[in-house]
Image: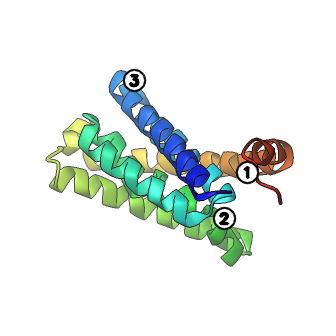
Amino acid sequence: MRSSTKTALGGIVAALSVTLMLLSAVVPFLEYALPAFSGALLLLLVIELGRGWAFGAYLSVSILSLIMLTNKEAAMMYVAFFGWYPVIKQSLERVLRLKPLAWLVKIVIFACSMVAAYFILIKLFGMRIEDLTDHGLKGLLGLLGMAVVMFVVLDVCMSRLILLYERRWQKKFRKLFGRKD
């Protein structure tokens, strides 16, 4: 694939990701789902162009989200986890071949990322715990537990999406973009 085609594809995916992130202002109750969907778009870049291009798109979307979004919680969810995780997902699974260990590591990474994101939201952006939940710290821990369940579902969906893409859409995509493999 030519460099200009790679740049165009990276720009298209980044623009779609930013558009999804901007929707969090219109549909605020999707402040976790929209960053997750936005990050999942980067899987295409990882598969077709490599982690470097996907990471570049992640950085672009992260900066634009932090600047443009009024919903800083959604922006922080993308920056702290949902944007970079799809970039490293396949590499992490290749290194950690033992599934229980892989799941443990992925869940710990997710939980630590979420704790860090909320710490930054509270300390840097001035959010109060009361703004996040009506039940204080116990509510935050409950929210984290539900988020871990959501992450497991998201991870399984990403794995199936990768398989579906590689089995059904990759040949068509590569033919469309003039890539022969």
Which circle's residue, 3 or 2, is located before the other in the chain? 3
| Viewer-nearest residue: 97 or 146 | 97
Q: Distance between the residues labelled 3 and 1?
A: 27 Å
Query: Which of the 4 quarters of the picture holds residue 71?
Result: top left
Is residue 98 shown above or below 171? Answer: below
Q: Position of residue 13 (x, y in %)?
A: 53, 43
Q: Position of residue 91 (x, y in %)?
A: 64, 70
Q: Name the residue under label 1.
A: 162
Percent of width and height locating residue 75: 34, 44
Figure quadrant of the C terminus: bottom right
Per the image, label 1 sits on a secondary structure element best described as helix
Contact (Cβ within 8 Å) of mark 2 with mark 1: yes
State which tag comes first along the sequence, 3 or 1.
Answer: 3
Q: Residue at x 74, y 75 (%)?
A: 97
Q: Which residue is drawn at 36% across and 27% down?
A: 28
Residue at position x 14%, y 47% from top?
A: 126
Identify the element where label 3 is drawn: loop
Label of residue 90 in the image: 2
Using the image as rendered, state which of residue 181 and residue 123 is in the foreground. Answer: 181
